[in-house]
Image: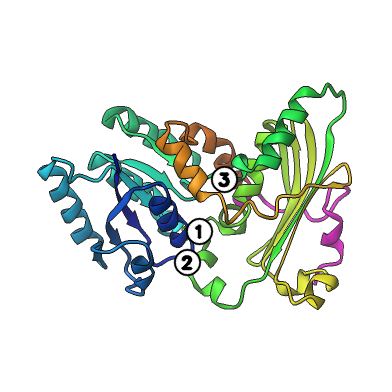
């Protein structure tokens, strides 16, 4: 039997992946909300969706459906709104008796997770988050390989992610740390979750540089030492990448060997939905370590470059 979905932030960049996942899993979008009314994309997936530009009216409509019952109520709320609204929109969903599928980061601060877990207990509903790289077959195979190995030395990891963004980025909510969590949270959290999942809990962290367009540092995990760099500055792209007119460079090396996961960002939302609907979704407990780390990095005082720094940091403009 199909489930009824509502979605917040339907005009945003990531929403089409959720619309496709809802449709691909045989479910129905009933209601959507976004202050921006450029939402014609809905018609590519569903018809007869009630759309609202004011959250208060969306709230009223969803609550009315809840009171009607008889299969009218919303079963799941997909949250694609700006990061700082995830906590409030998850609370809304639990209040109207729905489970949640929330884009990363599920929240900005670790104590938000504590409060949401209390609300889960009260409501009997669950909050799931999108950690799709954990479902990439090549990475699942790597995790099994790492778990089967017995090693007395830590892996040497180098994470480099440069994805060009124009001036609009810093003007939008994504460029406002209090709304997005900054680069570490908005762009880096998938990578940090992946590394913690593969190599164990964080034992030590230091931040070497921190600017609105780039940040870098060092992590000591249970089974790895990580030099990392995140940037949205096109000038930081390798010359070879720029010459090919590409706007993104993504690389994780493990003891000098490249880790391939180029398809993991765009193709797995439907898989995430299937896992959630089967009762195997990623929970708040799964999300906690990377949310905690991103919060620590966001609030750290940069030390400047040292022997643990990512080698590219010395040549960035």
Q: Which mark is residue 180?
A: 1
Q: CA distance from mark 2 to mark 3?
A: 23 Å
Residue at numbered disc 3: 132
State the image coordinates of residue 284 (x, y, percent, origin top left).
47, 35
Do callouts 1 and 2 mark residues in contact (Cβ within 8 Å)? Answer: yes
Do callouts 1 and 3 mark residues in contact (Cβ within 8 Å)? Answer: no
Q: Identify which residue is drawn at 24% across, 65% down.
A: 52
SS type, badge 3: helix
The crowding category of the residue bearing disc 3, from other C-alpha atoms within 10 Å (few below 14, some 14 to 19, many at least 20), is: many
State the image coordinates of residue 275 (x, y, percent, origin top left).
47, 37
Instruction: Classify residue 175 by image quadrant.
Output: bottom right
Q: CA distance from mark 1 to mark 2?
A: 6 Å
Q: The C terminus appears in which quarter of the rendering?
A: bottom right
Q: Compared with residue 235, is residue 56 higher up or lower down, i.e. above or below?
A: above
Direction from residue 132 to residue 62 in the image, left or right? left
Q: Identify which residue is drawn at 78% across, 43% down.
A: 226
SS type, badge 2: helix
Q: Was residue 100 drawn as part of the magenta stretch in this picture?
A: no
Magenta segment boundaries in residue numbering? 297-317
Q: Main secondary structure of the magenta part?
A: loop
The crowding category of the residue bearing disc 1, from other C-alpha atoms within 10 Å (few below 14, some 14 to 19, many at least 20), is: many
Which sits earlier in the primary sequence, circle 2 or circle 3? 3
For this rendering, which residue is in front, 63 or 27?
27
Q: Compared with residue 291, is residue 316 higher up or lower down, i.e. above or below?
A: below
Residue at numbered disc 2: 173
Q: How many marks?
A: 3
SS type, badge 1: helix
Q: Identify which residue is drawn at 86% across, 62% down.
A: 314
Which sits earlier in the primary sequence, circle 1 or circle 2? 2
Q: Compared with residue 39, is residue 225 higher up or lower down, i.e. above or below?
A: above
Which sits earlier in the primary sequence, circle 1 or circle 3? 3
């Amino acid at each position: 039997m199909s489930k009824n979905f509502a979605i917040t932030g339907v005009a945003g960049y990531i929403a089409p992946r959720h619309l496709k996942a809802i449709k691909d899993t045989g479910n129905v979008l009933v209601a959507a909300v976004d202050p921006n009314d450029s939402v014609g994309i809905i018609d590519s997936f569903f018809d007869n969706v009630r759309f609202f530009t004011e959250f208060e009216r969306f709230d009223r409509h969803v609550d009315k459906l809840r009171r009607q019952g008889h299969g009218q109520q919303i079963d799941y709320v997909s949250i694609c709104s700006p990061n700082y609204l995830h906590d409030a929109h998850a609370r809304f969903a639990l209040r109207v008796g729905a489970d949640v599928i929330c884009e990363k980061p599920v929240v900005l601060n670790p104590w938000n997770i504590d409060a949401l877990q209390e609300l889960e207990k009260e409501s009997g509903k669950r909050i799931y988050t999108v950690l799709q790289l954990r479902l990439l077959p090549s990475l699942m195979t790597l995790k099994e390989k790492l778990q089967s190995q017995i090693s007395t030395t830590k892996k040497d990891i180098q994470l480099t992610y440069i994805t060009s963004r124009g001036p609009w980025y810093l003007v939008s909510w994504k460029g406002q740390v209090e709304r997005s969590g900054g680069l570490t949270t908005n762009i880096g959290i998938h990578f940090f979750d992946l590394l913690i999942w593969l190599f164990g809990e964080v034992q030590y962290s230091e931040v070497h540089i921190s600017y609105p367009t780039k940040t870098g540092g060092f992590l000591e995990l249970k089974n790895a030492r990580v030099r990392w760099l995140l940037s949205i500055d096109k000038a930081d792209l390798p010359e070879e990448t720029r010459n090919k007119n590409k706007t993104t460079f993504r690389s994780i090396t493990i003891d000098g060997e490249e880790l391939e996961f180029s398809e993991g960002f765009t193709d797995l939302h439907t898989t995430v939905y299937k896992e959630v609907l089967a009762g195997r979704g990623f929970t708040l407990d799964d999300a906690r370590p990377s949310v905690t780390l991103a919060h620590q990095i966001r609030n750290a005082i940069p030390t400047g470059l040292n022997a643990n720094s990512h080698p590219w940091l010395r040549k960035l403009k």
